[in-house]
Amino acid sequence: MSDVKTLLGKRCPEEKINNIRAYHDVPRSAIIKLKVNEAYFLIYNITCMHRQSQSNEEYQGFELGPIRPPSEANSLLLRITRNCPWNKCKFCGLYTGERFSIRSVEHVCEDIDHVRYFVDEIHQAIHSSKDPKRTIANLQVSLSSADQLAFHSALNWLRAGMKSVFLQDANTLVMKPRDLVFILKHLRSRFPQIERVTSYARSHSVARINDADIADLAAAGLNRIHIGMESACNEVLDFIKKGVDKQTHILAGQKVKKAGIELSEYFMPGLGGKSLSRENAVESADALNQIDPDFIRIRTLAIPEMTELNVDVENENFKPLGDRELAEELLLFLESLQNIHSMVKSDHILNLFQEVEGQLPQDREKMISPIKVFLGMQPQEQLLYIVGRRTGVFMNLSDLNDTMLRKHAEKALIAHHVTLQNVDKWVSEMVKRFI
Ligand code: SF4
């Protein structure tokens, strides 16, 4: 045990201790009798608060970023950084024109505290009010617009069981590890029941973090990292300006796994276009074979209007694959995955085959089978499946056997005037609705 005031000396004025006390909701007696490591944690907290008090940016209320992975639908979304620090990938228009910034540790912690406050308020309304719905509605009406966001996040998260948190936006791991550790510890202390904290990260950023720092992040409770690998073919990576090469993807993935953090890698069929389709499949599978991630997530390329890749398409510098060619690429990719134990997920509406999901190696044939069946079908039958899938009538290839769904797909085919000649162009327009 140690007297924290002795440790902190002049760096710990009275009002700072009071701030910390209020911040962490602990009695003063507990603060002045902290263990040494806790005291250093406190020093760090004070340093952060001091730093933020010197910065110009004021807290603007709870923030939400634009996206999350489909698997994080039930997670609390906590914005750590804004937008993307890279923002150059040719196929991505998500953050075009948006400036990247890292939110202050203090502001993120305030977001966490806001959610804690509203979770408690909603709990109280549910358990002590005679009319919880009305009490919650009244609570909501009385809030400012900034607080409405925190309130809705708390309410949705409470309904989902408060088990997981997703850290936004595109690359949380660009933040200093010690800052992120601090946020994770604060989050875990305010919500001890959390089972999973996940984040997006770029391979480039992960590869630069040293092993000790990534181990600290794991120890502080970062459980899963989603990396948008997209491709591990160097020619493709160069062309689409991913800012990373195959070796860096491998290094980053292996580093995450070594730290004991779950790893989710995204593969993008179609990103090599017609000229690099084979390389996109084979090189990406080879990198994943060396990483053995926990999850491989398929997210088929769709090209938004306002992107550099769309300009390449218009200038004929990039020739996108049609659905039949995409199926061939996906088959080659799956067949090239060897000696790994990843769970393959196809959890995105852009994918032609939602049923291509399973655990490697035992589910390989189950995943490959519908693709082979599709490739063996007559062109007109393939066309019907493509139209049914792209209009949302079909979920799986087996839906072709459902008489009612089949009729709907046939109607859609006629209504959209889709033919074997125009189907690729038609699909490229249809999928833009989902980007
Ligand atoms: S790193 Fe991700 S978010 Fe950033 S530009 Fe590339 S794809 Fe978009």
Image (spheres, grey):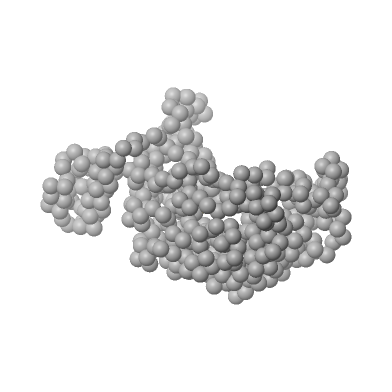
Viewport quadrant of the N terminus:
bottom left
Q: Residue at x 72, y 45 (%)?
A: 429
151 or 371: nearer the eye?
Answer: 371
Where residue 331 appears, x then y in whole percent?
71, 66
Q: Is residue 228 left or right of residue 375?
A: left
Instruction: Give the side of residue 82 with respect to residue 264, left or right.
Output: left
Q: Is residue 251 above or below residue 380?
A: below
Residue displayed at 78% across by 56% down: 397
Does residue 237 appear anywhere in the picture? yes
Q: How many marks?
A: 0
Residue 341 percent across, percent down from the top left? 58, 70
Residue 327 can be seen in this image: no
Residue 212 position within the rendered picture, expressed as x and y whole percent measured from the top left: 35, 66
Q: Point out the residue furthest to the front here.
A: 315
Taking depth in this image into account, of 273 and 30 the one nearest to the observer is: 273
Residue 234 in the image: above or below residue 11: below
Q: Is residue 33 above or below residue 257?
A: above
Q: Residue furthest bottom?
A: 339
Which picture quadrant has residue 28?
A: top left
Q: Position of residue 266 (x, y in %)?
A: 58, 59
Q: Would you say 35 lies left or right of 271 here? A: left
Q: Who's the residue at 63% across and 52% down the image? A: 309
Q: Residue at x 71, y 57 (%)?
A: 319
